[in-house]
Amino acid sequence: MGLYIHIPFCKQACHYCNFHFTTSDRYQEQMVGAIVKELYLQKDYLEGRSLESIYFGGGTPSVLSEKYLADIMEAIYQWFTVEKDAEITLEANPDDLTEEKLRFLKDTGINRLSIGVQSFRAEDLSLMNRAHTREEAILSLDRAFEVGFQDISLDLIYGIPTSTDAHWLENMEMALRFPIHHLSAYALTIEPKTALAHFIRQGKYPPVDEAMATRQFEMLMDFAQAKGWEHYEISNFALAGKIARHNTAYWQGKAYLGIGPSAHSFNIQSRQWNIANNQTYMKEIEKGCVPAEKEFLDVVTRYNEYVMTGLRTKWGCSLGHIRAYGAGFETFFRKEMRAKIQEGLVVENGTTYTLTQKGKHFADKVASDLMMV
């Protein structure tokens, strides 16, 4: 099973980000105390099953001090059984990864880093209001490998208004100059209440060019294939045997526990999500209550989620799995899928259906058309 820890702190707000975070570090000690306590309060959520993966996300987990990270790790091992070969990932910004910090992370048991480079170009980093520079990105990767980290994922963003196709190719080539095993790449999305959306409305930046984003996604898929990388999920690529175990568990519908404000949990039959308010979260945890809403998943919701997540991956959707929801679901799925196959968006391989390269451009639309209401 998987464990996710949400660390809601960042040095500064990236202009495109709409995740739950604060740029104030005033309550870090209290927040870490609440996270440690919630680990105890939620220790039975996974019914004693061992942890195959632990993922520190946010926010920016790498902003936490060594003491606070150690406190959380100690609590995890106190209240949960962690498998010896568990994948333990920490999301990090390049500017936080000093040699001292990297050595501490490795000694603490972190064995995988997800480094948010986003771009190696100064113009792109400025538009996104990233806290690091190109030089810091390169230095952080060099340091991580020198310290002994072997499992490193790098994040990139494409479709940036300040970037051309040639710039995007340079970013991809730069990323693979390092011996990374995993690459996550996302199209720049303009979320309504973000600073970037405001700046675009003001005319400070041009709007995202959807045609350019589509073209650069195609470039990404071709580039990865030519380099021998496996496109195992819409936004994720890996060398053989190096897929992200934690995130793959999400897409394959495995149970996981989320700790911290705004964190989500899933136990197959239900889903729950913690309140996205730091002060309320800490106050309720102090009282011994987990401030979460809960939704029990009916068969239609479980089917829809399977289609939505399954189609994003190289494993696709299987008729055997669809059939388990009931005969009506299989009949509906087969009927709707025929049109997608004829359009060249999906390929049928025995009883498994996966997106074609063309279909990956329309993943959300294909999944939406296959959902039941």
Image (cartoon, grey):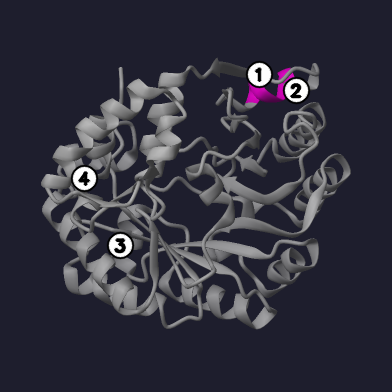
Q: Amino acid at mark 4?
A: Phe
Measure how far apart labels 3 and 2 are at the Cα level. 39 Å
Q: Earlier in the sequence, mark 3 or mark 1?
A: 3
Q: Residue at x 57, y 59 (%)?
A: 92
Q: How many marks?
A: 4
Q: Which residue is mark 3?
A: 124
Where residue 292 appears, as percent x and y from the top left, is: 62, 19
What residue is pinned by disc 1?
Answer: 291
Q: Residues within 10 Å of mark 3 (few under 14, many from 20)?
A: many
The residue at which mark 2 appears reads as 285
Which badge, 4 or 3, is on the more N-terminal residue?
A: 3
**Disc 2, SS:** helix
Q: Are marks 2 and 1 in contact (CB under 8 Å)?
A: yes
In contact (CB < 8 Å): disc 3 and disc 2:
no
Disc 2 versus disc 1: distance between alpha carbons? 7 Å
367 left or right, relative to 87: left
Q: Is residue 34 magenta?
A: no
